Image (spheres, grey):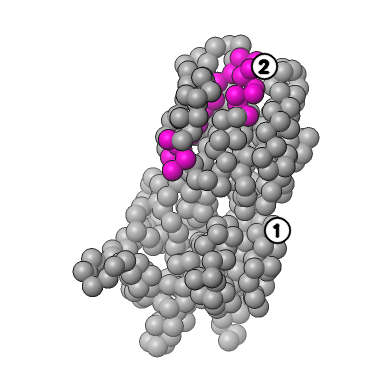
Amino acid sequence: MRIGIVCYPTFGGSGVVATELGLELSKRGHEIHFITYNQPVRLELLSHNVHYHEVNVPEYPLFHYQPYELALSSKLVDMVKLHQIEILHVHYAIPHAYAAYMAKKMLQEEGIYIPFVTTLHGTDITLVGSHPFYKTAVTFSINKSDAVTSVSQSLKDDTLRLFDIKNDIHVVPNFIDLERHEPHFTDCQRAMMATDDERIITHISNFREVKQIPDVIRVFYNIQKQIPAKLMMVGEGPEREPAELLCEELGITDKVIFFGNSNEIDKILCFSDLFLLPSLTESFGLSALEAMASGVPVISSNTGGIPEVNVHGVSGFLSEINDIDDMTKNALYILTDSNRLSEFKANAKGVSKRFDIHQIVPKYEKIYEDTLKKCMIL
């Protein structure tokens, strides 16, 4: 198949999943066309089966905000015609599903029928989509999609609760390439980060308010009062500077390292002993899955799709939102016993195998095939 993939090209979960999906599909013989405003961060290598088409938005003084949806829909029309793309897969309802629908209608005027699949990732539904300004457009876009998927049962339930959806929603979980999380280096250089007696705790996110960054810091603050420990903070966002100030207030600046965005996540997770994810909500919890695939147990909040990934008492523990004391207790339970830590590390890796990319991608292929067959009948 010739598949067009539309996504945000950033470090966020939806962009990462869309890129990894496209790369795996290309390995399975499909021709993939990424269509977005920048080359996706995980798209390191283009090939005869992987192509990137940049969406340019011309600047006009007339517009207070430049019309990306208009530029994207026009680009989709051009790329479908030029490369004979058979199906579009758009990640994030707004603006991508909306633009895909407009492209579909424009192409129909020329006798070209292009179906599109919409994958819901989370904040496009729970934050952006549920806003009164956007709710009508999001509902319309989902209902006009030829197929709809969500990355967790929790997100599907939220979507059906918040919107008047007539379409079926297929739950296809996020995935992980387990082969990429097998260490390809003999020494992950743990000694550069901590001494042998220190435990290493890690958090990876886009440092938005929903990630509860202060809770990460406070849980670690409690941990380091009981055992020698270091905290690795990976990512960028509006909550980074307040987090650095909080570390100063608590007197733990020398025990916390802020990496910013990093392309060496696998190495950072290699020397990690525990992963913290105390979010207000997560549609899935991809960062937790990446940690588990590297053999890192997870202490997380019991919200959204996280319980579908992190198995309580097996791959880590779930706590109620903002329950810093319970998260601390569970973290120390894992970290203070080396044998127990080894057991949780093995369990985390074992649970992650349920989400192996080779098990999940065929589900998308089946959805593409069924959608194309349905459209041929119509």
User: Where is residue 14 drawn, in percent x and y?
Assistant: 51, 54
Badge 1 marks a residue whose secondary structure is: helix
Residue, disc 1: 153
Q: Nearer the viewer, residue 258 or 31?
A: 258
User: Where is residue 203 drawn, in percent x and y?
Assistant: 55, 34
For the C terminus, give its image quadrant. bottom right
Magenta stretch bounds: 219-241
Q: Amino acid at mark 2?
A: Gln
228 within the magenta span: yes
Q: Residues within 10 Å of mark 1 (few under 14, many from 20)?
A: some
Which badge, 1 or 2, comes first in the chain's sequence? 1
Q: Quadrant of residue 347?
A: top right
Residue 116 can be seen, yes or no: no
User: Where is residue 329 drawn, in percent x and y?
Assistant: 73, 27
User: Where is residue 264 drawn, in percent x and y?
Assistant: 45, 33
Q: Nearer the viewer, residue 360 or 18?
A: 18
Q: Residue furthest right?
A: 313
What number is the disc on residue 226?
2
Residue 64 can be seen, yes or no: yes
Residue depicted at x 61% and y 11%: 197
